[in-house]
Amino acid sequence: MKLGIIYAGQGSQVVGMGKSFYHHPLFDEYPDLKELCFNGPLDRLSLTQNTQPCMVLVASIITDLLKENGIIPDYCAGLSLGEYSALYCANVFEQRQVIELARFRGKVMNEAAQGIDSEMIAVIKMERDILEDLCKQASSLGIVSISNYNCPGQLVVAGEKEAVEKVKELALEKGAKRVIPLNTSGPFHTALLKEASLALKERFQQEIFHEMKIPVIFNTLGHELKNQTIPEILEKQVMSPVYFEDSIRYMINQGVDTIIEIGPGKVLSGFVKKINKDIQLYQIEDNDSLEKTIKALKGEDYEIRK
């Protein structure tokens, strides 16, 4: 048995997340984030600059509790923001460091998106190469590209509104089953986030990146690092596509047959099922699901690591 852990990204947040871990001392160090996680309201929790540190705080607590029970993955990955939690799991970042980095990332992404008339849409049932070509056709109207390769049958397009609307029109003409507008606050994972990328580059020059103890599969690559550095990849990540489907396929090709999703809801688990229905899936968002997952893994052919 080989285990992968995947971390949810922005958009999965819910009011009350992390509340069953209220006794954890880390919450007392971040009273503002604790209040947002436990009580919201959802509109404030969903602001980019708030969502990101809140999601990472809760994910880091769950990661610690899994490790305390000897559950350490063979590989980890995360969707966009979730990649920071994966890097915490891999010991690249320290806990308080990763929470503050997520806070900074949310802030600069929000600032970079200000004043841009943008849109993000999910395109259902269309081949990658066809949609990539449609984005090229629409690019005369503005910056537009595929921002997320989530799973077979679901791609996300983001960019300047007029260009995205043209892609929507062309995609429906070319046979897309549906096009769904997404409730997001900016054209994330496109070239329009260059200012956020530059701000992250400057911030990373002040940060210590520790040796990676667990292989992380990176969004912008769909596989492990080769000739790149982690800061370089994270700088690019905010303005480059998320190759989530490729990342999961890579994980499976390395022998991973069991995956835990950490974060509210089961969005990523749904993607994984569409990529490979034979993967054993668990999802952890609270103390009950944590205990059920630990119990299930201890009953499987899994080597508990101390």
Image (cartoon, grey):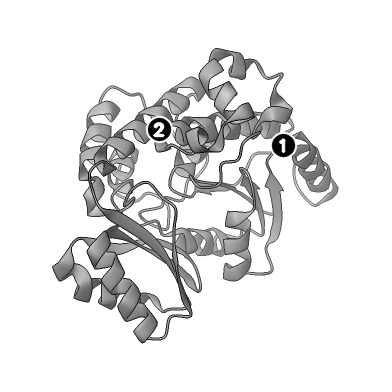
Q: Would residue 255 be visible to someone looking at this image?
A: yes
Give, as a three-letter code, the residue at label 2: Gln
Q: Is residue 27 left or right of residue 294?
A: left
Front position in the image: 40 or 226: 40
Mark 2 burial class by Cα count in 10 Å: few <14, some 14-19, many 20+ = many
Q: Would residue 92 be visible to someone looking at this image?
A: no
Residue displayed at 27% across by 60% down: 161
Mark 1 burial class by Cα count in 10 Å: few <14, some 14-19, many 20+ = some
Q: Position of residue 32 (x, y in %)?
A: 52, 19
Query: Which structural element holds mark 2?
Result: helix
Residue displayed at 55% across by 37% down: 42
The residues bearing labels 1 and 2 have C-alpha atoms spaced at a distance of 23 Å
Q: Quadrant of residue 242?
A: bottom left
Q: Quadrant of the C terminus?
A: top right
| Residue that badge 1 annotates | 286
Front position in the image: 157 or 256: 157
Q: Quadrant of residue 100?
A: top left
Q: Position of residue 117 (x, y in %)?
A: 25, 52
Give, as a three-letter code, the residue at label 1: Asp
Labels 1, 2: front one: 2
Q: Quadrant of the N terminus?
A: bottom right
Q: Residue furthest bottom?
A: 174
Query: Which structural element holds mark 1?
Result: loop
Q: Quadrant of residue 39?
A: top right
Q: Position of residue 6 (x, y in %)?
A: 57, 48
Front position in the image: 271 or 119: 119
On screen, residue 230 above or below 175: above
Mark number, residue 49: 2
